[in-house]
Image (cartoon, helix red, strand yellow):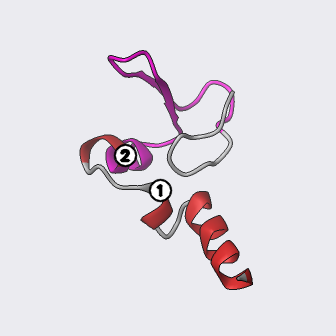
């Protein structure tokens, strides 16, 4: 199973949700929290503090 499209966590087999957009893009979510933040609230993972992408961006910014 792939990683969550929003937070980047590994999704254990038999859990999570697959969402297919109208344009054919497939999104995977490990929790309703991630799904709601991305689809309903239109939040960006880079700006959400608890996501893997935010932590990586912050590390990168500190190095420079």
Look at the numbered discs 1 and 2 and tell me whether their residues touch, using CB distance below 8 Å. yes
Which label's residue is closer to the chain start, 1 or 2?
A: 2
Which image quadrant: the N terminus?
A: top right
Quote the CA–CA distance across marks 1 and 2. 8 Å
Label 1: state its secondary structure. helix
x, y percentage for residue 32?
39, 43
Start and end of the magenta stretch?
11-37
Badge 1 crowding class, 10 Å Cα cut-off, few under 14, some 14 to 19, many 20 or more, is many
On whether residue 26 falls in the magenta region, the answer is: yes
Identify which residue is drawn at 46% across, 22% down: 25
x, y percentage for residue 58?
61, 75
Q: Which residue is mark 1?
A: 45
- Outermost residue, right side: 63
Identify which residue is drawn at 53% across, 40% down: 5
Badge 2 crowding class, 10 Å Cα cut-off, few under 14, some 14 to 19, many 20 or more, is some
Camera-nearest residue between 62 and 3:
62
Camera-nearest residue between 23 and 19:
23
On whether residue 22 falls in the magenta region, the answer is: yes
Numbered label tally: 2
The answer to which quarter of the image holds residue 35 is top left
Identify which residue is drawn at 68% across, 84% down: 62
Identify which residue is drawn at 37% across, 17% down: 23
- Outermost residue, front side: 64
- Tell me, for residue 21, which label it has, or none: none
Q: Which residue is mark 2?
A: 38
Label 2: state its secondary structure. helix
Above or below residue 21? Residue 47 is below
């Amino acid at each position: 199973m792939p990683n969550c499209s929003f937070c980047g966590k590994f999704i254990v087999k038999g859990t999570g949700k697959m969402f297919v957009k109208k344009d054919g893009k497939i999104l995977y979510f490990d929790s309703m929290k991630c799904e709601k933040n991305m689809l309903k609230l239109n939040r960006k993972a880079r700006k959400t503090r608890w996501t893997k992408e935010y932590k990586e961006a912050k590390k990168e910014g500190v190095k420079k």
